[in-house]
Image (cartoon, rainbow, N blue to C red):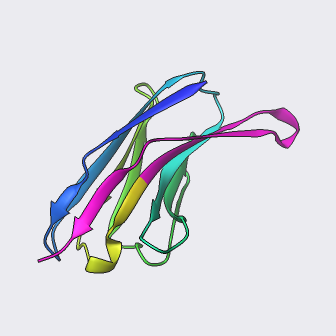
Amino acid sequence: QVQLVESGGGLVQPGGSLRLSCAASGSIFRLNVMGWYRQAPGKERELVATITSDGATNYADSVKDRFTVSRDNTENTVALQMNSLKPEDTAVYYCKLENRAGLGRRFNYWGQGTQVTVSS
Protein backbone atom coordinates (compact mmCIF):
# COMPACT_ATOMS: atom_id res chain seq x y z
CA GLN A 1 0.00 0.00 0.00
CA VAL A 2 0.96 3.60 -0.61
CA GLN A 3 -0.09 6.69 1.32
CA LEU A 4 -0.01 10.15 -0.23
CA VAL A 5 -0.28 13.36 1.79
CA GLU A 6 -0.74 16.66 -0.02
CA SER A 7 -0.19 20.18 1.24
CA GLY A 8 0.01 23.72 -0.07
CA GLY A 9 -3.43 24.56 -1.43
CA GLY A 10 -5.27 27.75 -0.66
CA LEU A 11 -6.71 31.00 -1.99
CA VAL A 12 -4.66 33.16 -4.34
CA GLN A 13 -5.37 36.13 -6.56
CA PRO A 14 -5.19 35.86 -10.35
CA GLY A 15 -1.60 36.13 -11.48
CA GLY A 16 -0.32 34.76 -8.19
CA SER A 17 1.62 31.62 -7.35
CA LEU A 18 1.17 28.55 -5.20
CA ARG A 19 3.29 25.48 -4.56
CA LEU A 20 1.74 22.09 -3.88
CA SER A 21 3.66 19.27 -2.26
CA CYS A 22 2.94 15.57 -1.90
CA ALA A 23 4.78 13.06 0.25
CA ALA A 24 4.51 9.36 -0.53
CA SER A 25 5.16 6.50 1.85
CA GLY A 26 4.75 2.75 1.78
CA SER A 27 5.50 0.31 -1.01
CA ILE A 28 6.94 2.49 -3.77
CA PHE A 29 8.33 0.68 -6.80
CA ARG A 30 11.58 1.70 -8.46
CA LEU A 31 9.66 2.45 -11.66
CA ASN A 32 6.82 4.81 -10.96
CA VAL A 33 5.11 7.96 -12.13
CA MET A 34 4.05 10.71 -9.76
CA GLY A 35 1.90 13.64 -10.69
CA TRP A 36 -1.00 15.94 -10.24
CA TYR A 37 -4.57 15.86 -11.46
CA ARG A 38 -7.38 18.29 -10.80
CA GLN A 39 -11.13 18.30 -10.71
CA ALA A 40 -13.27 21.42 -10.97
CA PRO A 41 -16.94 21.44 -9.91
CA GLY A 42 -19.08 19.71 -12.51
CA LYS A 43 -16.10 18.53 -14.52
CA GLU A 44 -14.15 15.31 -14.83
CA ARG A 45 -10.77 14.84 -13.22
CA GLU A 46 -8.01 15.82 -15.62
CA LEU A 47 -4.25 15.47 -15.85
CA VAL A 48 -2.20 18.51 -14.88
CA ALA A 49 1.38 17.24 -14.90
CA THR A 50 3.31 14.03 -14.33
CA ILE A 51 6.93 13.08 -13.82
CA THR A 52 8.48 9.64 -14.06
CA SER A 53 11.06 8.19 -11.72
CA ASP A 54 13.58 8.94 -14.49
CA GLY A 55 12.54 12.59 -14.59
CA ALA A 56 10.50 12.71 -17.80
CA THR A 57 7.67 15.21 -17.56
CA ASN A 58 4.29 15.64 -19.21
CA TYR A 59 1.99 18.66 -18.95
CA ALA A 60 -1.53 19.53 -19.94
CA ASP A 61 -1.52 22.17 -22.68
CA SER A 62 -3.47 24.53 -20.42
CA VAL A 63 -0.65 24.71 -17.85
CA LYS A 64 2.47 24.54 -20.01
CA ASP A 65 4.85 27.43 -19.37
CA ARG A 66 3.03 28.26 -16.12
CA PHE A 67 3.34 25.12 -13.97
CA THR A 68 6.44 23.09 -13.16
CA VAL A 69 6.42 19.57 -11.72
CA SER A 70 9.44 18.23 -9.84
CA ARG A 71 10.29 15.33 -7.59
CA ASP A 72 12.80 14.16 -5.03
CA ASN A 73 13.33 10.43 -5.35
CA THR A 74 15.25 10.16 -2.09
CA GLU A 75 12.37 11.71 -0.15
CA ASN A 76 9.56 10.28 -2.34
CA THR A 77 8.01 13.68 -2.82
CA VAL A 78 6.53 15.49 -5.79
CA ALA A 79 5.85 19.20 -6.06
CA LEU A 80 3.86 21.43 -8.39
CA GLN A 81 4.94 25.04 -8.72
CA MET A 82 2.03 27.02 -10.13
CA ASN A 83 2.67 30.51 -11.48
CA SER A 84 0.47 33.01 -13.31
CA LEU A 85 -2.61 31.37 -11.87
CA LYS A 86 -5.95 31.94 -13.54
CA PRO A 87 -9.51 31.60 -12.21
CA GLU A 88 -9.93 28.55 -14.44
CA ASP A 89 -7.18 26.82 -12.44
CA THR A 90 -9.59 26.65 -9.51
CA ALA A 91 -10.09 22.99 -8.60
CA VAL A 92 -9.31 20.28 -6.13
CA TYR A 93 -5.81 19.06 -6.92
CA TYR A 94 -4.97 15.41 -6.37
CA CYS A 95 -1.57 13.79 -6.09
CA LYS A 96 -1.23 10.43 -7.80
CA LEU A 97 1.41 7.73 -7.72
CA GLU A 98 1.44 4.94 -10.29
CA ASN A 99 3.62 1.96 -9.47
CA ARG A 100 4.77 0.11 -12.59
CA ALA A 101 5.48 -3.59 -12.37
CA GLY A 102 6.34 -6.17 -15.01
CA LEU A 103 3.93 -7.35 -17.72
CA GLY A 104 2.36 -3.92 -17.93
CA ARG A 105 0.83 -4.04 -14.48
CA ARG A 106 0.13 -0.68 -12.91
CA PHE A 107 -1.08 0.18 -9.43
CA ASN A 108 -2.57 3.61 -8.83
CA TYR A 109 -2.82 5.52 -5.56
CA TRP A 110 -4.41 8.90 -4.87
CA GLY A 111 -4.08 11.56 -2.24
CA GLN A 112 -7.05 13.11 -0.48
CA GLY A 113 -6.94 16.30 -2.56
CA THR A 114 -6.21 19.92 -1.76
CA GLN A 115 -8.33 22.90 -2.78
CA VAL A 116 -6.84 25.62 -4.96
CA THR A 117 -9.00 28.71 -5.45
CA VAL A 118 -7.95 31.54 -7.76
CA SER A 119 -10.10 34.58 -7.18
CA SER A 120 -9.87 38.30 -6.58
Q: Which residues are magenta?
A: 94-120
Q: Position of residue 30 (x, y in %)?
A: 63, 28
Locate the C terminus and report the quarter of the image it occupies: bottom left
Q: Is residue 81 visible?
A: yes
Q: Is residue 101 magenta?
A: yes
Residue nearest the viewer, comparing 8 with 75: 8
Q: Is residue 90 magenta?
A: no
Locate the N terminus and report the quarter of the image it occupies: top right
Q: Quadrant of residue 66?
A: bottom left
What residue is shown at x 13% (from left), y 72% (from top)?
13
Residue 30 shown left or right of residue 49 in the figure: right
Q: Position of residue 75 (x, y in %)?
A: 40, 26
Farthest residue in the front direction? 42
Q: Quadrant of residue 62?
A: bottom left
Q: Main secondary structure of the magenta part?
A: strand
Q: Position of residue 20 (x, y in %)?
A: 30, 49
